[in-house]
Image (cartoon, grey):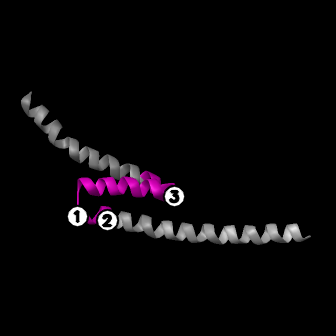
Amino acid sequence: MANTLSNATSDLPERKLMDLISHGDDFMKIELFRPALSYYRRALDLNPGNKVIGRNIEECKRLLVVEIKAIRILVAIAAVIISLYLLL
């Protein structure tokens, strides 16, 4: 019984890590990069130096930059359209 408890306890940090990565992956699949980044950062806190998690974080950051650029372009286009509409 003590051995089973010991194994369950030692597996807890690993399960927590895998759970955080899984949540991050799930958010990445549906292109919600901010929550994905949050989960990956928490996973990296549990396992510093993990290169896979580090690459996931860098990918999230890259995609967030692309997303922000796209939003800025859309806002600018909307502003032009609204301005033209108001001038008519």
What's the residue type where badge 1 is placed?
Answer: Gly
**Which residue is labeled 1 in the image?**
49
Would you call the spot at circle 3 few (<14 residues within 10 Å), some (14-19), or many (20 or more)? Answer: some
Name the disc covering residue 54, or none: 2
SS type, badge 1: loop
Q: Residue 86, relative to residue 43: is it above or below?
A: below
For disc 3, the marked residue is 31
Magenta highlight range: 26-53
Q: Residue flagged by tag 3: what amino acid is it? A: Glu
User: Does dot 3 land on a helix, a strand or a loop?
Assistant: loop
- The residue tagged with tag 2: helix, strand or loop? helix
Q: Judge from the rendering whether residue 4 lies leftward or rightward of residue 23; answer left or right.
A: left
Q: Closer to the camera, 1 or 57?
A: 57
Q: Decide if residue 69 is on the left or right side of residue 11.
A: right
Q: Quick one: 39 or 88, which is closer to the camera? A: 88
Residue in the picture at 31% in, 61% down: 53
Query: What residue is shown at x 57% (from left), y 71% (from top)?
Result: 69
